Amino acid sequence: MKSPWNWQLPDWPNFRWDPLRLAKAEEQFVHGAGVLVGAAKHLGADEQQALSIDVLSDEAMTTSAIEGEVLDRNSVQASILVELGLPGGRFGLPPAERGIGIMMVDLFRGFGEPLDSVTLGRWQALTVNGRADLRDIGRYRTHAEPMRIVSWTSRQPRVHFEAPPSSLIESEMAKYIGWFNDTAPDGRSPLPALTRAGVAHLYFESIHPFEDGNGRVGRAIAEKALAQTLERSALTALASAILARRRSYYEALAAASTTNEITPWLAWFAATALEAQQRTLARVEFVIDKAALLDRLRHNLNPRQEKVLVRVLGEGPGGFKGGLSAGNYATIANTSASTATRDLAELVAMGGLRREGELRHARYYPTIPDRPSHRIEIDPTGQVIRPSN
């Protein structure tokens, strides 16, 4: 006989967990937030703005990629710039990129506001912007057939989860929204950051209130919960960390779908959120290092070198995938092969780039150290560990 789903159990939605197993992770998250704030103070206003736009763009791209939707980054970023009223934005964008860009800015600006059904409906409509195959857009689902998460193996359907029927959604979501606002830092029953965000995400996904877009809206809610506790609008890059662990993400959700004792799920979520925070800190430190490098070299660079170095650093700590070649340099700088070779040798001598390989196989990379993200786990005793790869 099939086990009942979590929402069918008599204790729904009274989730249970072991706070002691999460205590050290909660402590590290709050400490990491302070480190991030301290690091960000070394950035100028323009650098902070550029960093926020990059993180918003990445989160828009990755939360969509988790659902198998590949978006155009330039269009996503243009949509975000339009919403922020900054130069570089443009209209006439593809509907999917336009919608997710608006939603990310809405989340970024309104993180401190209480959650309500209007906000959720707006976010869902934005995640499915341009879709003509859905009946319920911007509102809870109404279809009579079961809402199931299904995969197909050997031509046979496998049901991973079945959500509450549409007839229960209004009442379930009213309880959910009440719980979310009550557990906010200024609510009647506040919860620690990682615990609240993890419960909020699982609870929402268990109800699955929309015809589509539930994953993206649910991750936005988790980001909102984290931002409310930290009292700042910078995102935690949660979707990027989840994408890197996508398979275990779905496995952890599935394991939590038949029980309301959710300590294992919260331990998985907490570890992933700490990884996300680690990624964000690495990004901030890269921006600081990039600014310092450019400032140190600026008076020694010719216009060609400055143009190419800025372009390479714009790709992130690793520079161009596979490295910058002399041919790439000549194309970007619009110069001859001999000038490109001479410019590159000077950049290496100045410490702006490092070279790997010789002659036509030579490739060039930024000298800024790469800070790789380490896998994090919460062991059964609550220790935050980084297993060796």
Image (cartoon, grey):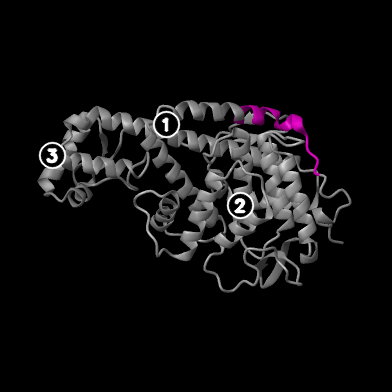
- Looking at the image, which residue is at 19% across and 52% down? 331
- The x and y percentages for residue 259 are 80, 49
- The stretch of residues the image draws in magenta is 15-29
| Vertical side of 27 occupied by 310: above or below | below
Q: Are marks 2 and 3 in contact (CB under 8 Å)?
A: no
- Looking at the image, which residue is at 33% across and 47% down? 322
Residue 342 occupies quadrant? top left
Determine whether the residue tagged by mark 3 lies in a helix, strand or loop: helix
- The x and y percentages for residue 107 are 56, 48
- The x and y percentages for residue 203 are 73, 50
Residue 207 occupies quadrant? bottom right
Judge whether residue 315 is colored magenta. no
Q: Say which quadrant the C terminus sits in.
A: top right
Give the residue number, with chain letter if any, for mark 1.
Answer: 285
- The x and y percentages for residue 305 are 19, 40
Question: How far is the residue under mark 2 from the one under mark 3?
Answer: 47 Å
Question: How far is the residue under mark 1 from the one under mark 2?
Answer: 29 Å
Give the residue number, with chain letter if any, for mark 2.
Answer: 247
Give the residue number, with chain letter if any, for mark 3.
Answer: 342
Q: Is residue 30 left or right of residue 334?
A: right
- Which mark is first along the chain, 2 or 1? 2
Q: Which tag is nearer the camera, tag 1 or tag 3? A: 1
Determine whether the residue tagged by mark 2 lies in a helix, strand or loop: helix
Residue 287: in sight, yes or no?
A: yes
- Which mark is first along the chain, 3 or 2? 2
Residue 389: in sight, yes or no?
A: no
Q: Are marks 1 and 3 in contact (CB under 8 Å)?
A: no
Q: Residue furthest right?
A: 10
Residue 185 occupies quadrant? top right
Question: How far is the residue under mark 1 from the one under mark 3?
Answer: 30 Å
Q: Nearer the viewer, residue 366 or 71?
A: 71
- Looking at the image, which residue is at 40% across and 58% down? 75
